[in-house]
Amino acid sequence: MTNCFDLGDILAIASIHPFYSDTPYPTKSEDLPILLAKQKESATDFKLSAFPLTRKEALYKEIARLTTDQDPRNGYRQGTYISTTGGGSGGGPPMVFATDSREIRQQRAAIGSLLRSCGITGPGDWIMTMHVSGHLYRALDLISEVLEGSGATVLCAGSQMEQDQMIETLIGYRVNAIAGDAGQIIQLARYISTLSEDKRRQLLINKALYTSEPMTPAQRSFLNSVFPNIAVSSVIGSAEAGPWAASPAELTETTKEQHFADFVYDQRLMHLEVFPFAVEDPQDPCNVDVRPLPDGEKGLLVQTSLQRLRHPLIRYVCGDVCSLHSLPEFIKAKISPEDAPHYKVARIYGRDRRISFDWYGEYFEFPVVQAALRTESWGILQYQIIQRYNEGDKDHLDIVLELRVLRHDEPGTIGEEELTQELRRFFTVFGNNEELFDLKYLCDYSGFIRSTTGRKVINFIDKTQD
């Protein structure tokens, strides 16, 4: 495996990197061999367990300094690939994470090989991607290079191409696969469902690859109604870790009714640990000597990248809830004997949602809300919850709960009137508070508030904190 680094070397560099020490600046790429040689001469035996957990707040505080420091010794600003994320709040400047330019190219090639090994994409596939690019956001070039690394041919439609142009592209180039955020794929599928039968027969789509956000059962059901024989796969990644795992169609199919997603990752490229939720409680006395959980137990996912040397990512608490599992036999059977022993499954249950919101005396937990709005018979393709004050309410006495919903009306879904009653019942709406419940049915995705960089629909927005 040429696209990964020795863990001992990574820890040696981490020991003198500003992320994990009081060293002021990271090294430049040309100085790495000298530093590694010195570390080996010192015969220091670095252990991963000796490094504390790394959290986003501390990491980005250091990143903010290094990003703008123009000192010529600052290796963070040299030979750097910049990746941004707008987070989930929809406001504030985008967070920036730097990676060595050569290392990120190697990582993309390695993940492309993972996609090919899992049978997700490969030679012969022509893929149109609708990912976002611009405003410092680089999802389009990232996913394009990953897909090309698998051997596929990529057409970059981006997020601004008109849908009728997309259809002509799909037909004209005999495209067999589409890629994008789950919402983008569903939006395109909705448009295709309105086309004439003759036009739809010209489409050759048999694969869909989604990223960024989970695909709900309702979305999956609708996609299958438009493309009955489509193989749906997924890739997971972040600005900090880059793309690191993939879910082939066989896994997305077996977990489509579950509240989790299974992703295959290569242990030669990423070292994962799962820690108890209690590690996030600084008052818990058990945190003094906390240890990773065994396979199968659910907790907080902690990542150590084996593809990052110059700016290491060590024991990073990424915010996902996860459990680790062995590779299923039906997946192992399709993977080469050389790779299979190194592959494992990360079961992702979503973000750490121990925070909740309350409205009109009721307490709502995010996992419970998400589970309800994923009810297949409700047909909800996308939703957004906004807490705000009424216009003109200068005293801010009453909080309005606004719910924006986009749904489909395929067979098996309940009517709008019945759904309205179900939603009112779930959010405990009655005579005394119904004027504070604002339910809006949208006809397309343009009515949702999106994040400033990735243009993702934000599921929960609290405008009372503005």
Image (cartoon, rainbow, N blue to C red):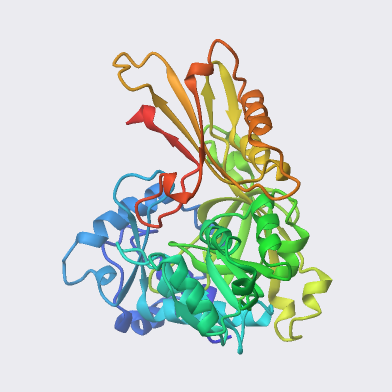
Vertical position of residue 238 compared to residue 143: above or below = above
Q: Position of residue 29 (x, y in %)?
A: 32, 80
Vertical position of residue 401 compared to residue 179: above or below = above
Q: How many discs appear? A: 0
Q: Position of residue 187 (x, y in %)?
A: 53, 58
Q: Is residue 4 or residue 134 the one in the foreground?
A: 134
Left/right placement of residue 275 relative to residue 391 reads right
| Residue drawn 76% across the image and 54% down it | 296
Q: Is residue 12 or residue 455 the one in the foreground?
A: 455
Vertical position of residue 78 compared to residue 394: above or below = below
Quarter occupied by residue 285: top right
| Residue drawn 35% across the image and 17% down it | 396
Quadrant for the C terminus in the image: top left
Q: Is residue 452 or residue 465 the one in the foreground?
A: 452
Most extreme residue toward the left is 71
Quadrant for the N terminus in the image: bottom right
| Residue drawn 56% across the image and 87% down it | 151
Left/right placement of residue 306 relative to residue 296 reads left
Q: Is residue 149 visible?
A: yes
